[in-house]
Image (cartoon, rainbow, N blue to C red):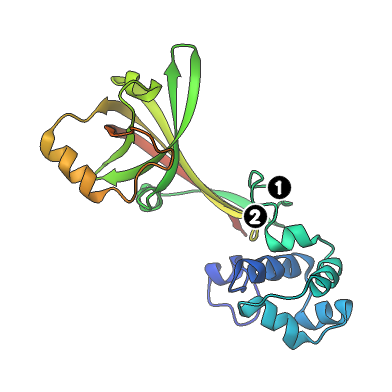
Amino acid sequence: MNKGSSGPAAAQAPTGRTDLGRRLAGRREELGLSREEVGERCGADATYVAYLEERAAAPAIGSLVRIAAALDTTVAELTGAMTDRPPGRGKAVLDAELVELPVGECRRLLSTHGVGRIAVSAPHGPGIFPVNYVVAGRDIAFRTSADAVLARAAGTEVAFEVDHIDDVTRLGWSVLAVGGMDGVTDAAELVRLDAVAYSLPWAGGGRTHWMKITLSRISGRRVVRR
């Protein structure tokens, strides 16, 4: 743990303030370099390295090339040009450990509205489908089209997974929930779900058919630094 850290969170996260700053700080910390050492490698002052990490900076391409070389990485990696690739390309963090999450923490992470994946038994074999979801009480709800595979899977047991992988810190977590899935038919519940929905489904189209998963078990794991 770095001197001056106040707890596990301080030890696990780079100090950058923007995406570029976080990537720069994360790579620097991965190599065990100080800002002064990075500055010496790229011919810049340590205060400039600090500026890039802590401010909304737009360095010239020449500066980015020198900094990337000093950090033994590429401009594409520093600027996020690789963000369309699946997460997890970075090397594992040193002294990583996988810990089980308590049910309360799993529910807290699950309650952050976002995109999750549902695994169902489809007519032509197993299928996994990403959906925008909301947490409604102790249930997970999402919208699909009335004739979609997910709608036809009503009355079956499904698995729902949501996760977060951070290539900058090389840390992450995943939560897995299992339960029975059914269509929502109660008029009052439909009105309530429409009211709490964070946004329309990203996939667009006529996805107005609400489904819900009534959870029977939930578990989760997190990658942390020892």
Q: Amino acid at mark 2?
A: Asp
Discs 1, 2 touching: Cβ within 8 Å: yes
Task: Determine the residue positioned at 37% across, 50% down.
Answer: 113
Name the residue nearer the viewer: 189 or 3. Answer: 189
Using the rendered view, name the quadrant where residue 190 is placed.
Answer: top left
Q: Position of residue 10 (x, y in %)?
A: 56, 72
Q: Name the residue located 42 percent from the left edge and 30 percent from the top edge.
A: 159
**Amino acid, disc 1:** Arg
Task: Determine crowd level at label 1: few under 14, some 14-19, many 20+ residues with C-alpha closer than 10 A.
Answer: few
Q: Quadrant of the rendered structure where residue 153 is?
A: top left
- Residue for point 17% across, 45% down: 192
179 or 69: nearer the viewer: 69
Left or right: residue 207 compared with residue 29: left
161 displayed left or right of 213: right
Residue 174 position (above or below residue 94): above
On the question of residue 222 being in view, the answer is no
Outermost residue on the front side: it is: 205
Q: Earlier in the sequence, mark 1 or mark 2?
A: 1
Q: Who's the residue at 58% across and 78% down the image?
A: 5
Q: Could you tell me which quadrant the C terminus lies in?
A: bottom right
Q: Nearer the viewer, residue 138 or 223?
A: 138
Q: Is residue 129 above or below residue 3?
A: above
- Return the x and y of residue 210 as percentages of the image width and height: 27, 33
Placement of 177 over or under 79, stated as above or below: above
Please, which residue is most extreme toward the left here? 188
Q: Which residue is mark 1?
A: 89
Quarter of the N terminus within the rendering: bottom right
Q: Which residue is mark 2?
A: 167
Q: Secondary structure at mark 1?
A: loop
